[in-house]
Image (tube, rainbow, N blue to C red):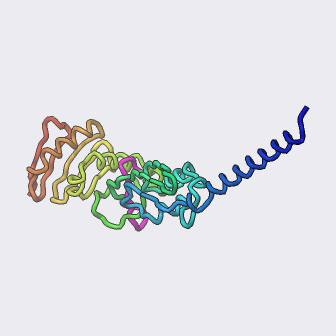
């Protein structure tokens, strides 16, 4: 049979346990665990303010109330972001590692120019025209963060992505109007014929190896048969 002392002791222990839980929860959600440091890695084109805004970290935020999965999903909606990893470090640090999409070419649309990556994803308006311009089927519409709806422009983006950054700097135009006769035009005035979109990695590799030997002036380089390239100067 339970005594009054046993009941009192049980009640006291329950109260102490309840107060401990309340104190522990209060401690977890105290300012001590507010996020005070956000380390952003890999962000070059994406501004830090845009990252913080997408993550909902504008203003005080408790690290236990921070929804990392939701923040990751929102960051991946940014067109220039390919992938994201987020880690929390107690008591108040968050590390964000971004992998950005690399712009490789420019496409004209209406009266403006837009940059795309090697998969054909539209990244945004082009601020500079320092990348190859794709001359292909004009898309019906563009949606930032989505693949451009034009097979020819997707092929052109792939060609641009196969080139090294140094080679891309030397190419002014990638003509993909005819996918059986893909052509490049260098800033030196050399027209390079790649032919159909087969063996493209090999063709670009051969172009890389021969590029330093190309003349500065009108000429054509035929790489339709990459093992037997033909260079012709034009008057």
Q: Nearer the viewer, residue 179 or 157?
A: 157
Q: Position of residue 131 (x, y in %)?
A: 29, 59
Residue at coordinates 50% horizontally, 55% vertically from top-left? Answer: 75
Q: Nearer the viewer, residue 92 or 202?
A: 92
Q: Position of residue 70 (x, y in %)?
A: 57, 51
Residue 140 seen in render: no
Residue 9 horizontal side relative to residue 195, left or right: right
Asked whether residue 177 is drawn in magenta, I would say no
Residue 53 seen in render: yes
Quadrant (top left/top right/bottom left/bottom right) for the N terminus: top right
Q: Quadrant of residue 155?
A: top left
Asked whether residue 115 is drawn in magenta, I would say yes
Q: Nearer the viewer, residue 55 or 32?
A: 32
Furthest-top residue in view?
A: 1
Q: Quadrant of residue 30?
A: bottom right
Q: Position of residue 17 (x, y in %)?
A: 73, 46
Q: Nearer the viewer, residue 4 or 181?
A: 4
Residue at coordinates 46% horizontally, 59% vertically from top-left? Answer: 38
Q: Which residues are magenta?
A: 107-120
Residue 163 horizontal side relative to residue 40, left or right: left
- Total tally of numbered discs in the picture: 0
Q: Position of residue 81 (x, y in %)?
A: 43, 53
């Amino acid at each position: 049979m339970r005594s009054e002392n046993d009941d009192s002791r049980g009640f006291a222990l329950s109260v102490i346990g309840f107060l401990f839980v309340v104190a522990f929860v209060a401690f977890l959600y105290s300012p001590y665990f507010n996020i005070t440091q956000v380390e952003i890695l890999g962000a070059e084109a994406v501004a830090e303010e845009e990252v913080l805004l997408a993550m909902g970290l504008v203003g005080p935020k408790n690290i236990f109330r921070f929804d990392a999965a939701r923040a990751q999903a929102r960051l991946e909606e940014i067109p220039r972001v390919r992938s994201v990893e987020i880690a929390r470090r107690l008591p108040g640090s968050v590390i964000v590692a971004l992998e950005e999409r690399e712009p490789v070419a420019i496409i004209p649309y209406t009266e403006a120019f837009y940059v795309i990556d090697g998969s054909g994803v539209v990244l945004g308006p082009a601020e500079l025209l320092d990348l190859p311009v794709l001359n292909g089927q004009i898309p019906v519409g563009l949606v930032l963060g989505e693949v451009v709806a034009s097979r020819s422009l997707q092929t052109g983006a792939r060609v641009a992505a196969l080139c090294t950054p140094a080679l891309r700097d030397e190419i002014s135009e990638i003509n993909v109007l005819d996918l059986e006769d893909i052509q490049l035009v260098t800033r030196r005035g050399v027209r390079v014929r790649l032919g159909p979109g087969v063996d493209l990695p090999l063709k670009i590799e051969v172009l890389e190896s021969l590029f330093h030997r190309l003349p500065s002036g009108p000429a054509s380089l035929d790489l339709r048969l990459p093992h037997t390239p033909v260079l012709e100067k034009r008057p």
